[in-house]
Amino acid sequence: MSFEIVQLGGAVFSGKRVEIPAFDPQKGFAVMSEVKAAAVADFAGTKEEVVGINANIDGVQTYLVAKEGANHGDTSFEFPEGQYAKFVTKETERAAIDGFIGQSYGEIGQSETVGIAGHFNLEDLRETDFTIYIPVVSK
């Protein structure tokens, strides 16, 4: 699995949030994936219009389905400017995508050049292929 380091500018996203259940190794990603897929379907006209942000908001692990800008829902998240590890997959099945996200974090954890720099990530659903951005810092 490979990734590239990219510099992203800051942006504000707003939309609708749902609580993400704690990961249960016996159930795998299925429950979390169902919650995310339902949230995207509920908020978006098409998934190509939105991003998904995994973040702790107000002390709750949250999946925010959002559009860029401040007036698209009841919750907003300021995505900070900085360096991000960019991972891309052609996978389309939600549970496999969530597995890919987990593998992406593992890849950064094993990196000799960068480490994880935040407790959030951006799933860019506007891209043709699934793209995730994870904040990183140089080691």
Image (cartoon, rainbow, N blue to C red):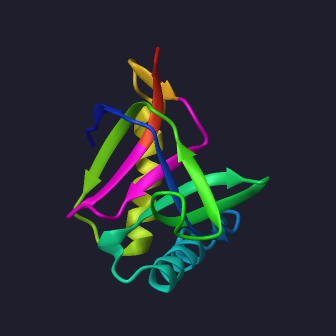
Q: Residue furthest top?
A: 139
Q: Nearer the viewer, residue 101 or 51?
A: 51
Q: Does residue 111 sit above or below 54 in this rendering?
A: above
Write the start and end of the magenta stretch as one range: 117-133
Residue 92, how many percent across, how many down? 29, 72
Left or right of 31 on screen, residue 47 = left
Left or right of 38 on screen, residue 5 = left
Left or right of 92 on screen, residue 138 = right
Q: Nearer the viewer, residue 59 or 29?
A: 59
At a point 29% along the width and 64% down the height, the residue shown is 126
At a point 64% along the width and 63% down the height, the residue shown is 75
In magenta stretch: residue 63: no
Q: Does residue 4 sit above or below 15 in this rendering?
A: above
Residue 98, how many percent across, how many down? 45, 63
Occupied quadrant, residue 61? bottom right
Q: Quadrant of the N terminus?
A: top left
Residue 50, how many percent across, how many down? 39, 67
At a point 52% along the width and 73% down the height, the residue shown is 36
Q: Does residue 110 sit above or below 43 in this rendering?
A: above
